[in-house]
Every structure is written in C-alpha cells, then in structure tokens.
Amino acid sequence: MRGAQRVMRVRWVRVRCVLCALCAAVAGAVAGCGGDSGSADGIVRSSWGDPPNPLEPANTNDVQGGKVLDMIFRGLKRYDPSTGEAKDALADRITTDDQRTYTVTIKKGHRFGNGEKVTAKSFTDAWNYGALLDNKQRNAYFFEYIEGYDKVHPVTGRPTARTLSGLRVTGERTFTVRLTQKFSSWPRTLGYNAYAPLPRAFFEDHAAWLKKPVGNGPYQVRSYDKGSVMKLRAWDGYRGPDKARNKGVDLRVYTDSNTAYTDLQAGNLDLVDDVPAQQLKFVRSDLGNRYINQPAGIIQTLTFPMYDRAWSGPARAKLRRGISMAINRAQITDRIFRSTRTPATDWTSPVLRRQGGYQPGLCGDACSYDPARARKLIAAGGGLPGGRMTITYNADTGSHKDWVDAVCNSVNTVLRSDRACVGKPVGTFADYRNKMAGKRMTGPFRAGWQMDYPLIQNFLQPLYYTDASSNDGHWSDTGFDRLVNQANAAPADGASITAFQDAEKILARQMPAIPLWYQNGSAGYAPRLREVTLNQFSVPVYSQIRVG
Amino acid sequence: MGRYVLRRLLQMIPVFLGATFLIFFMVYALGDPVAALFGDKAPDPATAARIRKDLYLDEPLWSQYVHYMGQVFGGHFGTAFNGQPVTELMAGAFPVTLRLTIVAIVFEVALGITLGVLSGLRRGRGLDTSVLLLTLVVVSIPTFVSGTVLQYVFGVRWGWARPSVAPEAPFTELLLPGVVLGLVSLAYTTRLTRTSLVENARADYVRTAVAKGLPRRRIVVRHLLRTSLIPVVTFIGTDIGALMGGAIVTERIFNIHGVGYQLYQGILRQNSPTVVGFVTILVIVFLLANLLVDLLYAVLDPRIRYA
C-alpha cells in the first residue's frame, strides 16, 4: 500500500513538472517573442481577403486577386483610375481597318521582374494558355471572341488545337488578332487582367511562379504567405508612367472586415477597402474625411426567371414593371445601406460617365416609386402568380437578407398584403448558383454584376444577349440582340453607344431584370496616408498612395 | 496499462473511419461547389466540367470517398481550391490554434481551479457567492460579445494589446484571444472544482487525514484536491477538442489564421478536402485527449487501476 502510494506520488510529481515546464514555456514565449510588424517606413499596410482561386491572370475573377494583379501586371491597356478611359499602357498602337482584324504593336523597353523582355510572344503565349481548356482557367471565356476559340475550348470533348488560330506573331513587338465577329470596342476591353502578358518563367516552372508571381507592373512580390499575408515592394525596373509613390504594400488577410476596421482605428493598419455595414453609422465620426464612398462598376438587380411561364411573356411585362415601381429604392438605399448604394435608373453604372453610355433616367417611370400605378400595373399584368412572390438570395455571404426583406416589405405595403412577397434564402452561394444554372428559380432572384471593364457593352451583352454567359434569367429578344450586334460593328464611338442605349430601352419596356441600385466602393485610411483613391473597380489605386 | 492503451488506440480506427465518412457525406450533401468558384458569373460549362473531373466530383459518392481515403493513407489530404495542398494549410493552422488552446487551457486551469478551491473551502461565505455570481455572468456572455468588447477596450481604447494577431501568431499576441476563448470554460472549471471539492470534503479519507493530524495545506492539496480534480480533468480533456475546433468565433474576431479560420473558409467554399482533413485531425486530437484523461484518472485517484 505504502509502496503503491510512493509510485503514485512520483507520477504526481512528474505531472506537476510537466505543467510547470508548460507554464515556463508560455512565460518564456511571452517574454521572448514580441510582435514585429510595426509600421515600416513608406509601406502601406492594407486589408485583403484570401483569393479563392490561384493567382494567375486568366484564373482570377475576384476583386481580391484582381487587386494584386493590378499591382504586379500591366497589360496593353489600362483604365484611367479617375475617368475610366482605356489608355495605352504597353500598347504602342492597336490598329484595324474592319473592326475585326487588329494589329497590335507593343512599346519598347518593358521587362518582367526577372529581367525577361516583354514581347509579342509574352502576350500570345499568355492568351493561348488562358484559352486552352486543359488549363481550366476561370476567365477562359474572355478569349471567346478570338478566332479558333472553339478549337482550344470546345463545349464538349477534348481540345483539337493548342493555340488560338486568330493570334499571329508578326515581329518581336507586333502581333495580329483576328476576331470571330466585328467588335469595335474590343481594344478597350484589353485593360482586363486576363489579358496580361506572362513571362516564360510562368510556363517553365509553374509551381514556383504561383508561389511567388513575377509580373511587369510597378510592384513585385517580395513574399507570399498564402492565406495570411503578401508583401509587395515597389520595383525600380518598371518603365511605365505610373511608378509606385510608396515603397511597398503589405496585404494582410482579414476574415472579418470588422477586425480590419478595429485594426485601422488602433493604428495597426493603414487602409481598409471594405467598411463593414455595422460601422457605417459611425464611420464619419471615426474617420472624418478619411472615408471614401464613391461609385463602383457594380449594379444589383432582381432578375426574373424567364423560363418560368408564370413570369415570362409580353403580357407579363406589365407585372414586372409594376413590381419595379413598387420598390422604394431611395428609402432602402438610405436606411439600410446608409448611402453606400444609389437608386438605379438604368442598367449600367455611373462610372461609365455620360460619354461612356451611362444615362440616368433611361429606365423612366418604371424605376421610380409609385404605389398607385404599381398596383394598377400589377393587376393589369395578371397579378402576382398565385397571389405571391418570393425573392431568392444566398444567405451565406453579403448580408442580403436585410435588403431583400426591405424590398418585400415595400412590395407588401404597396399591395396592402402581408404575405404577397417573402424572401427565400438559399444556404450557400454554390447552391444558389446551381439553382440558377439548373433553371430552378421560381420567382425573381438577386443578381449582382461587377463589370470586367468600364464599357457599356459589358453591362449589357453578357447579361441580356440570347444565351450569353451570365444571362441567368434566360431572357431572349431578337430586337435586343440585333441592336447589340449593330453596336459592336459600329466603327464610331457615338453610334455604338447610341445603339447600346437603344437596346437598353428594350430592357426598360420588358423589364427582364429590375435595376435596384448602383453599388459604391468604400474605404477608410489612416492619417499617415495621402492621395488615397479608388478606381472604378472599387480597388485602391496603390501606386498613387503617398505615405507620411 | 500498455495493453489498455493499445486497445484504446485500436478502437480509434473505426471511430476515425466513421467520422471521416460522416463528414465527407455531409459536405458532399451541400451540393456542387464548382459553380461558386466563378463568383457572380455563370461558369463556362466546359471549364466547370473539367474542374469537376479533376476533383472527382463527377464520380458517385462512394467512389469519391474511396479515392479520398486512398489519398489520406498516402499522406495526401487533397488540395484546396486556391491550389494549396491541405497538408500545407494544416501545417500553418494547427500550431497557431495549438498555441491559442494552450493559452486558454493554462488560463482556465490556473485561475479556474484556484477560484474553485477558494470558494469551495469557504462555502456559503461572501467569496463563494461573489465567485458564483461572477461565473454566472461569464457563462451568460457569448464569446462574440466578450471578444469584441475586450478587443475594443484593450486594443483600441487602452492600446495594451493588438486588436488583431499577426500572421506568425506569437504567444504574447494570443494572450487576449486565449483569455476570451477560455472565459466560458473558466466558469465551468471553477464551478466543477468547487462542487467536487465540497462533496469530497466529507469523505472518509479526508476525515482520516484530518484525524492523523496532517497540516491543512497538505490535506487540501494532496488528499482533497487530487481526487476532486477527476471531473475537472474530464471536462478539460473534452474541452481541448472543443477549443481547437470551436475557436471559429474567437479566431474570426482576432483575425487568427488557425483551424477555425480554415474550417470556415472550407465550409464557405464547400471544399470537402479541407473540411474533412481538418475535422479528421480534430477527431484524432479529441480521441487522444480523452485517452490522456482516462490515464490521468489513475494518477489522480489511487483507487483506479488499468490492467
């Protein structure tokens, strides 16, 4: 008995020792490892979200990944951060006689961060890579206008060619592009990240490139710790006009924008480009004029399932217009979004400006709140199918519930019924997309469109052209299609934009999607930063920021 | 003892298989994740089909599971959608969460047991009542409230701690999150210790010890506390697993890129390799912690023996 007890005591002592050692380890660590990452001179510390896809130009379709590409790459064109105009970046000139075959000449003297020259081949190789089905690039469809796309990216089966037949290198710095159709504004789409040039290193050691991307922009990646931080430093070798005005940018991944905002307040972060909804009430008093709230190329709509007979057909246009008129946009953008959205009156975005085809009021009466006429129109359109409607949205991201409930509330008030309209949440975004793709929507559903490039074409063709890639309501109208084709073939800007706006007027008459509001980009920054601006994609223009 | 441990380890195999299958099945039931990879745009069907094929999503569930388990036994846990191997994510996330858990456990053990003993020995007095009240308050405040409030007060108002944790997540920066994480468990530990102590104070062996004339300190620490710790140790053992997997809220508030963060991302993006891989490791941690607890019983209570 005594013996056993001694053994036990020894063990007990041992356990205590382990505990003590553990405590000592914690204490030692407490004393030993202090936090670093103080504010380094000239470096901008900015919030970031983990990009969902690998960081390749043709594989990045989200804002967070786009942010990085915008810093480390320069393509043929670049959108002016303040006007949105597509200006020549690496392109010396892009010429065409027929709006279909383009000759591209690249400026001399540009290099990649690893010393390689940027040549015509850097572009064609990158585009061929992006288009090829085997590479599974999310943005492959951007190359669909180039001849030979159907061979490298067939709808079914294996590719029958490795390269786009429409691309031909004609010199070290020149190449020609032949499109499948006339597309007058094609050169102006080339500011999109998917069209960036790629160095040979990308193809030769792909894994290493992904670990530490090398580009030809004003910044180079110093280190990339996936899922937590990317350190970018200004690059001396950059020859473009928009050299970085700071020494670098540290992008830190935040899971919750509230934490980023708190960090900004505590001085641990210099720039947040997503002010959380809960903080909007206080943001003016917290940050004063260090808060930016300006239009971005994003529009939110309620799209109707035109494959559902209860909602489609010309007779139902009155119903759709009536619902649009039953939504009190001004009140919702003011109360729920606290003016970070603007009521929409057309299907484009204010960032296009008037010259670019934005026309406020194009939607006409159909987009203004008018309860009496809304009631009449809905009745004339046969009333809500079965007396009820649902608005489908995904519940996992973006806090859509608030505004969907508000829209329904507005419709219910107009129709003097509590049960006319209810929100219908879908658990995950993926499931939501699958329902959309499977044509399983039974009523209007939320749709958001973030432009790829600031052109009116990008707000209309991908969304409403027959069988277009993002025509989720599957609306189809021959008149609309004809006008879009006509606009694309028009050689002059003015004629093209007028044709697009005429097409838009068809949308106003038929209302296959109700424009709700234009979304703003928002950002807040620390006192030590100056000249912080957002571009049309609601991404901070990092190269212009000055520190100190 | 050795045989007992071996038997317990062997029992883990069916639990492991069952757990992985259940989780795999549940993530699978969420539906096809590929569409979400394309953001607000409709995926191009050819590319989506190719991605599905590469992820084995075009095969029936059982064959996906067999393929996945084959990979796991080869030491490969699959790939997240951003192209990172899940093992790499684990190597980054688990040490961080482990550090966070250690801070939380040390905090709740040290403070919880001390408070429990103090209030247990002074049952019914002022100290006991105040501790009772305090634990009640702590239990009733959800983590996201205590987390954001403490973060704001300590991080922004007073500037004593960083509101968010650096990617390297050193122990110093994990103190505040660790305390937040351990708060609720602290209350439980305190109350468990107190109750158990009060109960055992009337036991025969304590009376014997008192009758032998042992010093009070020795009676409390060696005789009373040691046996009273059994329920507390049981609780802490299960708590290790719960803290490691359940730190999602705390990790989000303090921007800690640990297990909770990766799980959250994995669930949001419906990436089954990430979710299944992480949960599988958590299941193993849970099982091992339980085994450790069972072995500790024998150390704490001389009456318990394992053959």
Image (spheres, coloured by chain):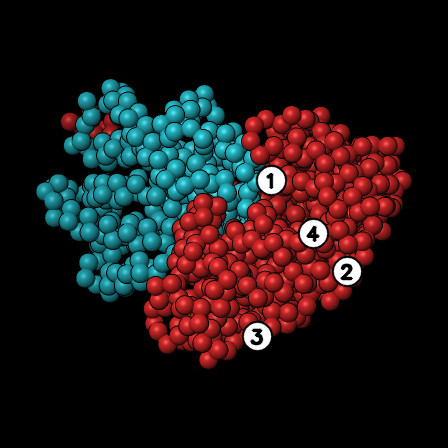
In the rendered image of this protein, does residue A293 appear above or below residue A62?
below
Q: Position of residue A76 (x, y in %)?
A: 79, 45
What is the number of the mark on residue A365?
3
**CB-based contact (under 8 Å), mark 4 and mark 3:** no
Mark with earlier residue (2, 3): 3
Mark with earlier residue (4, 2): 4
Residue assigned mark 1: A138
What is the number of the mark on residue A495?
2
Q: Position of residue A508 (x, y in %)?
A: 58, 66
Q: Amino acid at mark 4?
A: Asn
**CB-based contact (under 8 Å), mark 1 and mark 2:** no
Q: Amino acid at mark 3?
A: Asp
Residue A327 showing in the rendered view: no
Residue furthest toward the bottom? A372
Report how far apart the C-alphas of labels 4 and 2 lie in the structure. 12 Å
What is the number of the mark on residue A485?
4
Tell me the cyan chain.
Answer: B
In the rendered image of this protein, does residue A517 appear above or below residue B42?
below
